[in-house]
Image (cartoon, helix red, strand yellow):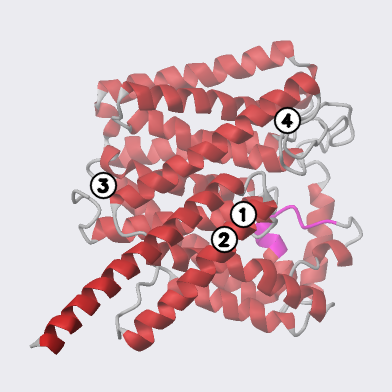
């Protein structure tokens, strides 16, 4: 009798300990979303802490508790992508360099969806990650505003770019290394915040906070002068509203329709104001369709990248080796082309399948849900991923540096986990 009581107490203590560990991992994941745009040290500290705790928790659950391990949707394709890229390492033009970054960077990206599946169990967990993200957005927005008035940001001391795309337009970088990175981040969070404002039924204080952050992020987007990010913002924003208006018939709600039309007016007014006040914005818009300005020389880059893909079709030139084998000393300026170039068919096919199936699953979810407000936190992270997929037709940020790479894969993992919970009926339960 005593031993049975002791066993029950021990099981209860282990259950409590397991919940505490999950909460710690969730906290670390929230800190990653805060730090990833501006602090590599902070990001790595919390990311590695989360991964280490997750790894030992998985071992404990599998070998000692004999529990079924929660895996994210698309885990088979994510694992196949991991294996495909791993195989391509052995055919890299520099095996040591590629394998170093494979374990030091790439593998951490792909682990993020698995970490999200393990530590996210309730709606409030995704809410926590959403508001953690907002802290990071606010820090970046204030930093960009500071850079606009002083000429450098207060985090990394980056100066504004005095010359971009062969002309003297002045572009903001914020805490990022380059203006297109700021543009990609600002476009993704602007779409997320805009959709949150239109569809969410939060209280007035929450909406005021979102409005302020939207103004900061949209300011960052405009003055990054990243035209690809401008296009990604517009395309993803209208795709989302087309899906909802056409299939979900959400625009029958007059309040939602008025919010949408008002937001379209604000976007138009903001760009018109920036066009008249900023010579940099004016120059970037005026030269949009002049000569080769639209692609910015990317057609030449893509042509060379394709020729290298033909030379190394199966395994590619090596992970993160594109800048060392191309004449332009950079990536392919297209994430899909860049992954094909660096990892060959063995990495490209799993990645394309991940993109296609993820978009299909999340789009069907967006179309078919009855209450968008109830699932707005899940959809917010989907909106981020959708914007990155569009933006990366002209850039290569998805598997790039610590900032945007981690931001994308974390958003993908969170939205997939939220989708799983919602489809199981767990997401709508009270916490």
Tell me which residue sits at (63%, 50%) in the image. 404
| Residue 204 seen in the current view | yes
Residue 26 drawn above or below residue 287: below
Precedes in sequence: disc 1 or disc 4:
1
Residue found 43% across the figure and 43% down from its top: 130
Which residue is pictured at 70% across the width and 34% down the height? 227
**Residue position marked by numbered label 4 in the rendering:** 225
Q: CA distance from mark 2 to mark 1?
A: 6 Å
Secondary structure, mark 3, is loop
Secondary structure beneath label 1: helix
The nearer-to-camera label among 1 and 4 is 1
Q: Are marks 2 and 1 in contact (CB under 8 Å)?
A: yes
Residue closest to the far right: 327
Mark 1 or mark 3: name the one nearer the start of the chain. 1
Q: Earlier in the sequence, mark 4 or mark 3?
A: 4
Is 148 on the left or on the right of 266, as rendered?
Answer: right
- Of marks 2 and 3, the one in the foreground: 2
Q: Which mark is residue 47?
A: 2
Q: Which tag, 2 or 3, sits closer to the chain's start?
A: 2
Residue 235 makes an appearance in the image? no
Alpha carbons under labels 2 and 3: distance apart: 32 Å
């Amino acid at each position: 009798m005593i031993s049975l009581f002791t066993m029950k107490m021990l099981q209860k203590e282990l259950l409590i300990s397991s919940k505490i560990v999950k909460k710690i991992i969730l906290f670390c994941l929230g800190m990653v979303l805060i730090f990833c745009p501006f602090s590599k040290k902070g990001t790595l500290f919390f990311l590695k802490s989360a991964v280490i705790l997750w790894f030992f928790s998985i071992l404990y659950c599998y070998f000692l508790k004999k529990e079924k391990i929660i895996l994210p949707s698309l885990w088979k394709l994510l694992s196949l992508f991991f294996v495909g890229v791993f195989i391509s390492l052995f055919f890299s033009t520099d095996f040591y360099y590629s394998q170093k970054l494979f374990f030091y960077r790439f593998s951490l990206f792909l682990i993020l969806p698995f970490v999200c599946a393990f530590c996210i169990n309730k709606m409030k967990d995704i809410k926590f990650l959403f508001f953690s993200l907002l802290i990071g957005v606010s820090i970046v927005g204030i930093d960009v505003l500071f850079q606009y008035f002083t000429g450098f940001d207060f985090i990394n001391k980056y100066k504004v770019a005095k010359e971009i795309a062969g002309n003297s337009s002045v572009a903001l970088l914020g805490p990022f290394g380059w203006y297109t990175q700021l543009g990609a981040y600002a476009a993704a969070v602007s779409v997320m915040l805009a959709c949150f404002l239109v569809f969410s039924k939060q209280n007035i204080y929450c909406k005021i906070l979102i409005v302020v952050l939207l103004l900061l992020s949209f300011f960052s987007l405009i003055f990054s002068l990243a035209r690809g990010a401008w296009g990604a913002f517009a395309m993803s924003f209208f795709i989302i509203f087309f899906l909802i208006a056409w299939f979900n018939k959400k625009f029958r709600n007059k309040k939602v329709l008025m919010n949408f039309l008002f937001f379209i007016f604000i976007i138009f007014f903001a760009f018109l104001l920036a066009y008249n006040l900023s010579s940099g914005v004016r120059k970037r818009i005026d030269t949009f369709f002049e000569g080769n300005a639209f692609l910015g020389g990317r057609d030449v880059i893509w042509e060379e990248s394709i020729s290298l893909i033909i030379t190394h079709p199966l395994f590619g030139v090596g992970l993160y080796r594109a800048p060392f084998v191309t004449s332009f000393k950079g990536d392919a300026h297209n994430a899909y082309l860049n992954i094909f170039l660096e990892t060959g068919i063995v990495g490209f096919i799993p990645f394309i399948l991940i993109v296609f199936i993820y978009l299909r699953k999340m789009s069907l979810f967006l179309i078919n849900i009855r209450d968008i407000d109830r699932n707005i936190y899940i959809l917010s992270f989907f909106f981020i991923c959708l914007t990155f997929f569009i933006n990366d037709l002209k850039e290569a940020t998805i598997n790039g540096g610590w900032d945007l790479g981690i931001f994308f894969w974390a958003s993908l993992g969170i939205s997939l986990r939220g989708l799983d919970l919602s489809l199981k009926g767990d997401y709508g339960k009270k916490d």
